[in-house]
Image (tube, rainbow, N blue to C red):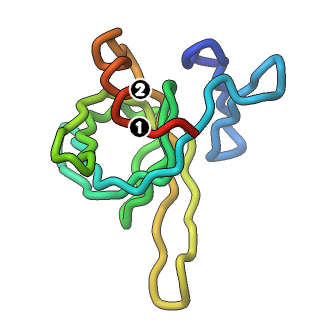
Amino acid sequence: MGIPCFGSWVLTSPLVERIVVLDDSNKRQHKRAHIKWPVKIQSEKKTFNGETRNISESGLLICTKEPLRLNQDYSMSIHSPDADILEFNGKVVWSDLYGIDESEAVYGIGICFMKVSETELDTLKRKVPNP
């Protein structure tokens, strides 16, 4: 069973707690820009703080100290360096525990943007440097 995510299909497996994005061309649909901007992630019950690691027109990679649930929708506020805030809704499509160093570990979380308007997409393209 799968869910569409901006032109690709996201498949889940009951045996693996990871979601695999299948792409017919075996290449990324959109180029990623490697940026580190603060992000607030809002669930129905809690707010999480994190930092972007990279971003594209279809989603982003964030790091946070707390895990987010797979297949869960979240509201996000990305804080750009010029103090503007980009607001998006997204779905967690994968999550891994990354060790930063011996004393600190964070979760790397892949998020697919959901229901992005043309205005939001244009704003994202203007704010994010070309990869």
Q: Check disc 1 and report the residue beneath it.
A: 128
Instruction: Locate residue 59 relative to residue 99 in the image: left or right.
Output: left
- Towards the viewer: 37 or 67: 37
What residue did someone put label 2 on?
A: 125
Whether residues under marks 1 and 2 lie with C-beta atoms below 8 angstroms apart, the answer is yes
Q: Is residue 100 visible?
A: yes
Q: Helix, strand, or loop for circle 2? A: helix
Where residue 63 appears, as percent x and y from the top left, is 44, 58
11 over 47 or under it: above or below: above
Of residue 105 and residue 120, the one placed in the foreground of this image is 120
User: Residue placed farthest to the top in the image?
Assistant: 118
The one nearer the camera, 102 or 17, is: 102
Classify 42 as above or below 100.
Answer: above
Q: CA distance from mark 1 to mark 2?
A: 6 Å
Q: Which of the labelled discs sits on residue 24, or is there none?
A: none
Residue 8: name its quadrant: top right
Q: Secondary structure at mark 1?
A: loop
Where's the C terminus, which quadrant? top right
Amino acid type, residue under disc 2 in the picture: Lys
Q: Is residue 35 above or below residue 21?
A: below
Q: Position of residue 72 (x, y in %)?
A: 40, 34
Residue 93: which quarter of the image? top right
Q: What's under tag 1, amino acid-wise?
A: Val
Q: Is residue 1 visible?
A: no
Which residue shows up at 69% across the image and 45% down it?
Answer: 16
Instruction: Give x and y (percent) for residue 68.
Output: 40, 49
Left/right of residue 33 with respect to residue 113 in the rendered view = right
Which residue lies at the image location 26% right of the left edge and 51% below the top edge?
81
Query: What is the quadrant of residue 74 in the picture?
Result: top left
Which residue is painted at 19% across and 38% down in the image? 85
Residue name at image x 51 percent, y 33 percent = 56
Q: Quadrant of the N terminus?
A: top right
